[in-house]
């Protein structure tokens, strides 16, 4: 039987998503915080440390 009404999408299964109960802004915030923390844990590149050292020497 054919109807003119569009079919309803099937419900999504989010059983594996641990963030399903959180609003989207909170999900985004937590993910950004994790990325930021990962960046903070990275060592400062030697080239950048050398540039900072040279800048300190020129300012003194």
Image (cartoon, rainbow, N blue to C red):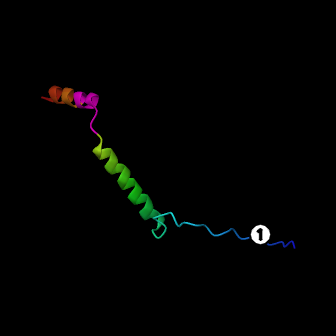
Q: How packed is label 1: few (under 14 Cα within 10 Å), some, or many (20 or more)?
A: few
The overriding secondary structure of the stretch rendered in magenta is helix
Left or right position of 42 against 59: right
Label 1: which residue? Answer: 6
Q: Residue at x 29, y 46 (%)?
A: 40
Q: Position of residue 18 (x, y in %)?
A: 46, 64
Regarding mark 1 in the picture, which secondary structure is present there?
Answer: loop
Quadrant where the C terminus lies?
top left
Left or right position of 44 against 33: left
Left or right position of 1 against 14: right
Q: Residue at x 77, y 69 (%)?
A: 6
Q: Residue at x 17, y 30 (%)?
A: 56
- In the image, is residue 45 part of the stretch drawn in magenta? yes
Residue sitting at the far front: 16
In the rendered image of this protein, does residue 23 appear above or below residue 28?
A: below
Quadrant where the N terminus lies?
bottom right
Q: Residue at x 54, y 66 (%)?
A: 14
Q: Position of residue 24 (x, y in %)?
A: 48, 64
Bounds of the magenta segment = 43-51
Q: Position of residue 15 (x, y in %)?
A: 53, 67
């Amino acid at each position: 039987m054919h109807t003119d009404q569009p079919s309803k999408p099937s419900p999504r299964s989010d059983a594996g998503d641990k963030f399903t109960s959180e609003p989207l802004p909170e999900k985004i915030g937590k993910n950004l915080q994790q990325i930021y923390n990962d960046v903070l844990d990275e060592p400062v590149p030697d080239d950048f440390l050398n540039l900072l050292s040279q800048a300190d020497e020129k300012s003194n």
